[in-house]
Image: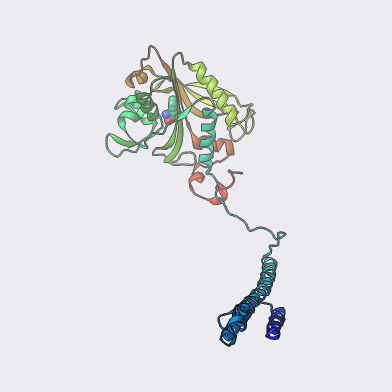
Amino acid sequence: MQEKFEEIKIKAREELKNISSLKLLNDIKIKFVGKNGEVTSLLRGMKDISADKRSEFGKMVNDLKEEVNAYIEKKESELKEKELQARYEKESVDITLPAKEEKSGSTHPLTLVKNQIIDAFSGMGFEVFEGPEIDSDYYCFQALNIPKDHPARDMQDTFYFTDNILLRPHTSPGQVRTMENKKPPIKILSPGRVYRADDDASHSPMFHQIEGLVVDKGVSLCDLKGLLDEFVKIMFDSETKTRFRPSYFPFTEPSVEVDVTCCKCHGKGCSLCKGTGWIEILGAGVVNKNVLEMSGIDSNVYSGLAFGCGIERIAMIKYGVSDIRTFFENNVKFLKQFDRR
Ligand code: PHE
């Protein structure tokens, strides 16, 4: 019997030595320690063993089973390790290969410029408030000191839905909506789309403005000058200067048009500034007392300043874009030039 046991051990070891796959290992497992395997079958011989020797025999079979199992487990871990190594080798990555190009989108130049303007003013304590694009005659005109049939309505060629409902032609209604809802001190920016019946290389029927409004005690034209001087230095470069020209808007008094020194020639005169050295960037002024009063603000206590600039205009000046329509054509080559992340 002892011999038979030894024989099985040797055979198991021999067979295990020559295999190279887990599949074959499993076959061997079945062959020796499976339900009908050689080791397990030895137990069937139990009945021929005398009662007093049975327990010893059973122990011997179990020991043999354990030993054969130990061989199998050892081989199994060797084979698994080998298989893993082979997989590592097969799956290894050549890090010297050039990477695949990842295509990513970029921020639209108008969004970029809008964010730059907001960043510049939020550094000076301004908050953002967005008003509706479809608005009423009251907010777009009347509350801004432009009554019905006032000639200043011709300054903007407005798209009307009805006599009373229209596409806002400027972001100035944002001033009124803010003053109605907020007590001074007020310091807000109101960016958004505006619409006018105008269409050529420098005008688009839809474009973007950003409105600024400050209302507090003792606010004056000097504050406007200081604020805009700071803004243009952040937006263009630290050498940029402003120039205020008298102008007219019904909602500001006095009103000004603000020019900056040309960012291309720095005031010497070039094609961008048409030889003048200056470029107009926005309209502004001290908020008309009528406008404050109509929005429920006591003009004897408070005063305000407001400005409104075209985002396309700033972007065109800053990046030398000559046709406003290129912003809306969605030509990826054009759009990609601006956002250098
Ligand atoms: N709303 C004016 C425009 O569209 C700009 C402006 C805003 C002027 C605020 C003065 C004050 O031209």
Residue 264: percent from left, percent from top: 63, 34
Q: Residue at x 42, y 41 (%)?
A: 206
The answer, for residue 135, to whether it is visible in the render is yes
Instruction: Return the residue nearer the eye: 7 or 132.
Output: 7
| Image quarter hosting the C terminus | top right
The location of residue 58, given as percent across then percent down, is 60, 78
Nearest the viewer among 175 and 319 is 175
Q: Residue furthest left?
A: 163
Foreground of the two, 333 or 320: 333
Q: How many marks?
A: 0
Quadrant for the N terminus in the image: bottom right
Q: Which residue shows up at 36% across the image and 21% down it?
A: 291
Taking the spot 53% from the left edge, 20% from the top edge, the residue there is 225
Q: Quadrant of residue 253?
A: top left
Residue positioned most to the front: 52
Whether residue 276 is visible? no
Q: Residue 299 at what x, y percent from top left? A: 37, 14
Question: Taking 74 as reference, is 196 left or right?
Answer: left
Of 39 and 283, the residue lying toward us: 39
Q: Residue furthest bottom?
A: 48
Q: Give above or below for 285 relative to 263.
A: above
Q: Is residue 45 left or right of residue 3?
A: left
Residue 119 quadrant: top right
Residue 88 x %, y %: 68, 65
Describe residue 282's horizontal placement relative to residue 139 as left or right: right
Colour setting: rainbow
- Name the residue at 54% across, 51% down: 332
Q: Quadrant of ligand 1?
A: top left
